Image: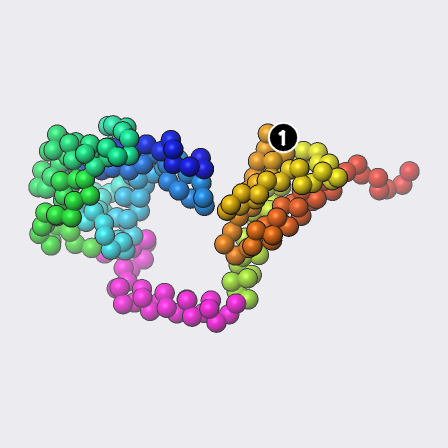
Amino acid sequence: MESNEHVLGEIYIMTNTVNEKVYVGQTVSHRKNHARYMPFGYTGRFKDHISEAMCNTKKHQCRYLNSAIRKYGKDAFAVKLIEVCPLDKLNERETFHIQNSNSMYPNGYNLTAGGRTLEHVKVPTEQTNPAGKRGGCVSRSLETRAKMSASLKTLFEGNESIGQLRSEKARIQHMADKTNLFKGVEIDVTQIDSYITRRKTCILVKVGDRTTRFAGKRYTPDELHSHAIEFLKSLASATLPNCSGTP
């Protein structure tokens, strides 16, 4: 989707199958990614919870819930959708379900009453200890991570060729993926521009029932347009009759 017109709110409940404690949260059916709204929903948010717990690097996180995920393991938790509602009702419905499910600490894992409130329940420190490991490696301090980030930033800023190489490599890979998608289509090289549509943030290419897009912050609209033409010409060349060889 290219607009949030059909995006809905979702209320979900996570259950620890070992002790039956629950957590109620809110999310959206689609999340914006590269100018388009892609499916996300409660299953996507559940994966985020697991990732946040395992990495333990996010500053603002559900610490009590994440501590439990690390303690009992991700397989001990199940997630279920309990309500779909308009976006403007999300806070109200989340608050209702937190109260209805009795999921506030210490009975459950919610530390707020819901609805984006800033008032948190205080949990004893020993119940929210950070993970001993992060993503399979020893957890690094904030200072260490800051130094690593600064070093990488300096490296890439000081060596423009690295950034260009990474960008070009990614573009070539994306071009190969697009070529596979359009495999077998026939292109009229005299009507190249008829397959191309300029949008505000990208260039669309449509041939029959197949569509792809060219986008990227590193490229100007004209460069993206050139990439689209290059792509279509390569497709046309690939479908030309093979006239080589001995007669």
The residue at the point 26 percent across, 41 percent down is 74
The reply to whether residue 68 is in sight is no
Instruction: Give left or right: position of 232 versus 93.
Output: right
Corner quadrant of residue 40: top left
Residue 80: say if magenta: no
Residue 145: say if magenta: yes
Mark 1 crowdedness (10 Å alpha carbons): few <14, some 14-19, many ≥20: few
In this rendering, is residue 112 above or below 88? below
Residue 57, position as x, y percentages in the image: 27, 55
Corner quadrant of residue 245: top right
The residue at the point 38 percent across, 31 percent down is 6
Point out the image quarter for the N terminus.
top left
The reply to whether residue 35 is in sight is yes
The residue at the point 60 percent across, 53 percent down is 223
Q: Who is closer to the viewer here, 65 or 42?
A: 42
Judging by the rendered image, the residue that carries numbered circle 1 is 208
Q: Secondary structure at mark 1?
A: loop
Residue 165, position as x, y percentages in the image: 56, 61
Instruction: Give left or right: position of 74 versus 21.
Output: right
What's drawn in magenta, residue-wise? Answer: 131-160
Q: Who is closer to the viewer here, 14 or 7?
A: 7
In this rendering, is residue 65 above or below 136? above
Q: Who is closer to the viewer here, 29 or 7?
A: 7
Residue 49, position as x, y percentages in the image: 27, 43
The residue at the point 51 percent across, 62 percent down is 163
Corner quadrant of residue 82: top left
Instruction: Give left or right: position of 39 versus 12.
Output: right
What is the three-letter code of the residue carrying label 1? Gly
